[in-house]
């Protein structure tokens, strides 16, 4: 099979899995996905998640790095790479003593990367952007004597992104751009019912959104000795307007009638925020890597439903490293705040730790990567749900010398 056919097969494989990845609601059960675009996804691959999710300063020709577009130039001139990852999690929920456990799993991302020349690398992939998935309810005493109301909240959907990437390296500086097409559907509903009468009232809202995104990246390599170097990386994403179709309905159901108080489409603006990230790694060849990332997202200036008072700025910090001794041993930690305010005007803090291992295959080029982490969502005020997760990611990084010229004997 020639080079063009192999690339075509890989692209078709990526596209074939799009419907699976786009079904994001199967990947979460968090009640906090009631707000905004839901739970923001981690765009890193399994090898990076084992290191706490770092990536801005990572530059490794044996692994795909979707976090910094400039890293795509760090590909061997004769290598084609394909990375696909599966994600699973077990969630533990504590709602003022009412405890519950749920789990989710599914295919999460696919990425390909290959060289055009010794200095130019390109790639493509599909990655998640956000998840929405929840279903919970509560009983409350009504103002009408002898009547109890039951309120149920339910939502599903999420956002995904298909992207292409190109990067160029000149001397020790690399620059890259990632062009993405973001798309998805989010549906939410609230149902209010009564135990003494058959009336029900249901509020529904749905969002269908899509749009182009741009992500720019830089990396600078500074050698310290023959086998050590420091890599400094930076990324920037400008604010993006989404093409959106947003509709709401308010319908009262009773024994004798169905009364729509409101139903229809709303002309409201939805945006994704500008993002700036910076990171650095210290690398000793074939021995170890340590690094850190800092990310700032300007959600406070992004409109959600035509408003800028429901989202808040988000800061994220990632720390991690890797030690190589036949296997690739990884560990890391991270912290971030929420990007939205809940119904009572508060958010949560997110803390996580992770470990991982990369197992080289017999060809010494491909890898089987495992990552496992613990995560805690701690609300900033009492009375909100505490959420704890154990997350798993497994991926296979296929690294093949497809561009090698074979000699005729």
Image: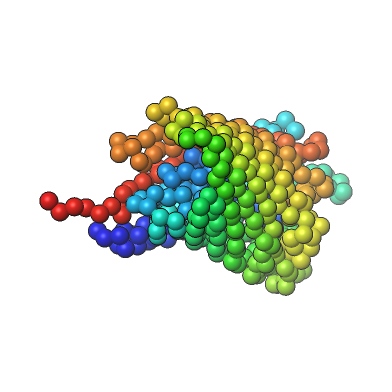
**Is 287 positioned to the left or the right of 309 in the image?**
left
Task: Judge whether 353 appears above or below 181 on screen.
Answer: above
Q: Residue drawn 73% across and 69% down?
A: 268
Q: Where is residue 316 in the image (x, y as percent from the top left)?
A: 68, 43
Task: Judge whether 357 appears above or below 119 on screen.
Answer: above
Q: Residue drawn 35% across and 60% down?
A: 7
Would you identify the image quadrant in which residue 373 lies? top right
Q: Where is residue 178 in the image (x, y as percent from the top left)?
A: 54, 59
**On-image quarter of the N terminus:** bottom left
- Whether residue 399 is visible, yes or no, is yes
Is 80 or 132 nearer to us in this picture?
80
Q: Position of residue 30 (x, y in %)?
A: 64, 44
Q: Where is residue 93 in the image (x, y as percent from the top left)?
A: 66, 35
Q: Residue drawn 73% across and 36% down?
A: 378
Would you identify the image quadrant in which residue 232 lies? top right
**Is 91 positioned to the left or the right of 403 in the image?**
right
């Amino acid at each position: 099979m020639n080079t063009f056919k192999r690339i075509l097969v890989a692209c078709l494989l990526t596209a074939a899995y799009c419907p699976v990845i786009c079904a994001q609601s199967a990947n979460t059960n968090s009640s906090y996905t009631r707000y905004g675009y839901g739970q923001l996804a981690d765009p890193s691959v399994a090898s990076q998640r084992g290191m706490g999710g770092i990536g801005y300063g990572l530059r490794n020709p044996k692994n795909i790095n979707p976090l910094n577009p400039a890293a795509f130039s760090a590909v061997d001139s004769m290598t084609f790479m394909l990375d696909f990852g599966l994600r699973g999690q077990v969630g533990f929920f504590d709602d003022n003593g009412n405890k519950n456990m749920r789990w989710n799993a599914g295919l999460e991302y696919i990425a390909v990367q290959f060289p055009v020349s010794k200095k130019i690398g390109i790639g493509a992939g599909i990655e998640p952007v956000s998840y929405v998935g929840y279903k919970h309810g509560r009983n409350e005493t009504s103002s009408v004597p002898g009547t109890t109301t039951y309120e149920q909240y339910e939502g599903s959907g999420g956002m995904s992104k298909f992207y292409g990437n190109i990067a160029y390296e000149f001397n020790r500086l690399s620059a890259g751009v990632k062009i993405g097409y973001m798309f998805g559907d989010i549906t939410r509903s609230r149902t209010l019912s009564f135990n003494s009468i058959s009336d029900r009232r249901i509020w529904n809202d749905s969002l269908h959104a899509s749009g182009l995104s741009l992500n720019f990246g830089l990396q600078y390599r500074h050698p310290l000795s023959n086998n050590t170097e420091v890599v400094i990386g930076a990324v920037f994403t400008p604010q993006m307007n989404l093409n959106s179709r947003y509709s709401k309905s308010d319908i009262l159901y009773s024994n004798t009638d169905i009364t729509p108080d409101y139903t229809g489409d709303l002309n409201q603006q939805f945006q994704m925020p500008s993002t700036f990230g910076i990171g650095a790694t210290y690398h000793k060849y074939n021995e170890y890597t340590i690094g850190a990332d800092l990310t700032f997202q300007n959600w406070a200036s992004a409109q959600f439903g035509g408003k800028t008072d429901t989202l808040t700025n988000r800061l994220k910090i990632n720390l991690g490293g890797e030690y190589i001794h036949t296997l690739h041993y990884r560990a890391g930690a991270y912290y971030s705040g929420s990007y939205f305010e809940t119904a009572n005007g508060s958010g949560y803090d997110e803390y996580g730790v992770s470990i991982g291992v990369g197992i080289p295959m017999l060809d010494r080029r491909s890898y089987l990567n495992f990552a496992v982490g613990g995560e805690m969502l701690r609300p900033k005020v009492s009375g909100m749900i505490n959420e704890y997760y154990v997350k798993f990611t497994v991926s296979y990084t296929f690294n093949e010398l497809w561009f090698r010229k074979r000699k005729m004997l």
